[in-house]
Image (cartoon, helix red, strand yellow):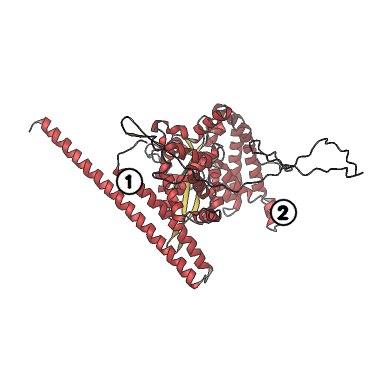
């Protein structure tokens, strides 16, 4: 057999194997979609049975009400997951498409926004003088009192009409092409989908509560239908999420943090984790816009950040959580991550021992504080004062200021720590706070990395601010219904928090993105990123 024939045979074999692999993948996606839909149907039937039992036998306990809430939230996650799987199976069957602290001031009422419409209500004027009764009165002015009012949410049905025309010459029918829908064969408009998604993930309102409110407003939408919209939105917004992910992971410095998230499990809930990695170069006047990237995991094992940041190298600002240690290994591929620890965490340990007001609140003597802890706080605060003054300066200016102003304070603090630690028992709370900063290998170097790098911040507040919404909303949405539900929440938090970091309304942005994305070429999708969208909106407003 000639060499040419052998190459042709191998190519044919490769093509056949590729076709078989594609067919197997399509079949797998179809099976997965079927399983997801079946799970959602089973859960819906269980919920229906529970409701029928409650209607028949009455509410016997608070536990039964909680059980219904849990079933509804679990159904919500399964419905959204089923929609994602069904869309993935559909797409696989068809052609691949491209698609500082502060001083509290006396509050005052700000003027109402100018863009709000004004409705003038004139109080009936007097017809005679209220003093002497004369009717010879003339208007000399008026007093206007503004009251802010709200019009109840308005629902409407938009009918898109495509007229048909017939040709008298060739008898053919002409009609405008059908417009792109936010979701395939969808009935929900982009503003409705954006509102449901933002209410759930941005305002922490579970879908069952939204459905109840919609019903009271005269529009009945089932829980499963709303969950279906969330699944469609997740699939539709995937290109935007991918661009934000690439933007965050292309940074050479990140803030990292995690927080607890209840995850529904057999017999109750277990503690899962939501992780965030924040790109924010504004403290050193960096050019790239800020963005946040979220991930979900069932536990807090170190393998999670290693997976999240696989292939990434740079400076990671975080607390001293040992789960990040795998990122700092010298033999890591593509190289070790540079540690930069947060001084706010370290300061808090001393502050709790020197908090006079805290002692008073706890009915402890105000003088019952540690003088060593108080001095540590004062020394650290002197470093914080310098950082406030240089915030927003260039990397070079920050580095120069730190060499002159900060380095002597840091070196003096380190010498003071060592001196005080030698005089204290290892069980002394202040000694433990000092140990947190200096005793473990490389710990002090990580705390002082900011002195020699103008990009590094003193604290990790950027990541903590990104997590604030999660902490505030946990009690509202109770728990993540499943691993995929947690992943979906992390997906939507990435979009919503990034929008907030760029000072734009997340709901308005999501609505516009969902409206324009189906008809936008892949090469222009970046125009819908929050920072580009904001610039475009400002230009339009200026015109």
**Which residues are drawn in magenta?**
175-188
**Magenta span: chief secondary structure:** loop
Tag on residue 37? none
**What residue is at 46 percent from the left and 70 percent from the top?**
53
Neighbours of disc 1 within 10 Å: few (<14), some (14-19), many (20+)? some
| Left or right of residue 377: residue 254 | left
**530 or 232, nearer to the observer:** 232
Q: Position of residue 186 (x, y in %)?
A: 42, 45
- The secondary element bearing badge 2 is classed as loop
Neighbours of disc 2 within 10 Å: few (<14), some (14-19), many (20+)? some
Tag on residue 366? 2
Position of the C terminus, as image quadrant, is: top right
N-term mark: 1 or 2: 1
Q: Is residue 258 magenta?
A: no
Q: Position of residue 22 (x, y in %)?
A: 25, 43
Instruction: Tell me the mark number nearer the camera, choosing from 1 and 2.
Output: 1
How many numbered callouts?
Answer: 2
| Whether residue 422 can be seen here | no
Whole-angstrom CA distance, mark 1 to mark 2, is: 68 Å
Q: Position of residue 65 (x, y in %)?
A: 51, 65
- The secondary element bearing badge 1 is classed as helix
**84 or 189, nearer to the observer:** 189
Q: Is residue 191 above or below residue 535?
A: below
Q: Quadrant of residue 448?
A: top right
| Left or right of residue 7: residue 488 | right
Task: Give the labeled residue for mark 1.
Answer: 90
**What residue is at 28 percent from the left and 46 percent from the top?**
26
**136 or 328, nearer to the observer:** 136
Name the residue at the front extreme: 168
**332 or 165, nearer to the observer:** 165
Q: Position of residue 95 (x, y in %)?
A: 30, 39
């Amino acid at each position: 057999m000639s060499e040419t024939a052998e190459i042709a045979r191998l190519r044919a074999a490769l093509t056949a194997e590729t076709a078989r692999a594609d067919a197997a993948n399509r079949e797998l996606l179809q099976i997965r979609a079927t399983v997801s839909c079946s799970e959602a149907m089973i859960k819906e039937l269980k919920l229906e049975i529970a409701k029928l039992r409650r209607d028949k036998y009455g509410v016997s306990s608070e536990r039964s009400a909680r059980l219904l809430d849990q079933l509804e939230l679990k159904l919500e996650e399964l419905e959204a997951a089923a929609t994602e799987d069904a869309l993935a199976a559909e797409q696989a069957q068809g052609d691949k498409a491209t698609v500082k602290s502060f001083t509290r001031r006396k509050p005052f009422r700000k003027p109402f926004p100018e863009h709000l419409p004004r409705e003038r209500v004139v109080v009936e004027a007097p017809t005679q003088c209220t003093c002497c009764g004369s009717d010879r009165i003339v208007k000399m002015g008026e007093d206007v009192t503004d009251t802010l009012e709200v019009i109840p949410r308005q629902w409407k049905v938009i009918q898109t009409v495509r007229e048909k025309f017939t040709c008298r010459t060739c008898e053919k029918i002409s009609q405008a092409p059908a417009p792109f829908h936010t979701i395939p064969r969808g009935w929900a408009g982009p503003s409705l989908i954006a509102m449901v998604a933002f209410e759930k993930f941005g305002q922490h309102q579970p879908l069952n509560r939204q459905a109840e409110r919609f019903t009271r407003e005269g529009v009945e939408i089932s829980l499963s239908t709303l969950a279906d919209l969330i699944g469609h939105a997740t699939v539709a917004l995937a290109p935007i999420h991918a661009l934000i992910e690439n933007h965050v992971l292309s940074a050479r410095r990140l803030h990292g943090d995690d927080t607890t998230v209840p995850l529904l499990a057999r017999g109750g809930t277990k503690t899962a984790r939501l992780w965030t990695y924040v790109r924010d170069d504004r403290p050193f006047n960096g050019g790239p816009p800020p963005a946040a990237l979220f991930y979900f995991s069932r536990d807090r094992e170190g393998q999670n950040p290693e997976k999240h940041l696989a292939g990434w190298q740079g400076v990671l600002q975080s607390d001293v959580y040992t789960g990040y240690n795998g990122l700092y290994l010298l033999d890591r591929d593509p190289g070790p991550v540079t540690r930069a620890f947060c001084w706010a965490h370290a300061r808090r340990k001393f502050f709790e021992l020197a908090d006079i007001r805290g002692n008073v609140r706890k009915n402890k003597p105000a003088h019952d504080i540690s003088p060593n802890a108080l001095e540590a706080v004062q020394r650290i605060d002197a470093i914080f004062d310098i950082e406030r003054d240089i915030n927003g300066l260039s990397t070079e200016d920050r580095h120069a200021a730190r060499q002159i102003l900060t380095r002597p304070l840091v070196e003096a603090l380190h010498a003071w720590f060592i001196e005080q630690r030698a005089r204290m028992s290892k069980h002394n709370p202040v000694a433990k706070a000092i140990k947190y900063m200096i005793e473990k290998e490389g710990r002090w170097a990580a705390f002082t990395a900011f002195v020699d790098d103008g990009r590094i911040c003193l604290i990790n507040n950027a990541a903590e601010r990104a997590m604030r919404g999660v902490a505030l909303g946990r009690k509202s949405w109770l728990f993540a219904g499943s691993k995929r539900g947690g992943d979906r929440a992390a997906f939507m938090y990435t979009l919503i928090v990034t929008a907030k970091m760029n000072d734009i309304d997340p709901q308005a942005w999501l609505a516009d993105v969902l409206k324009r994305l189906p008809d936008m070429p892949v090469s222009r999708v970046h125009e819908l990123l929050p920072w580009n969208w904001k610039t475009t909106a400002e230009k339009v407003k200026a015109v």
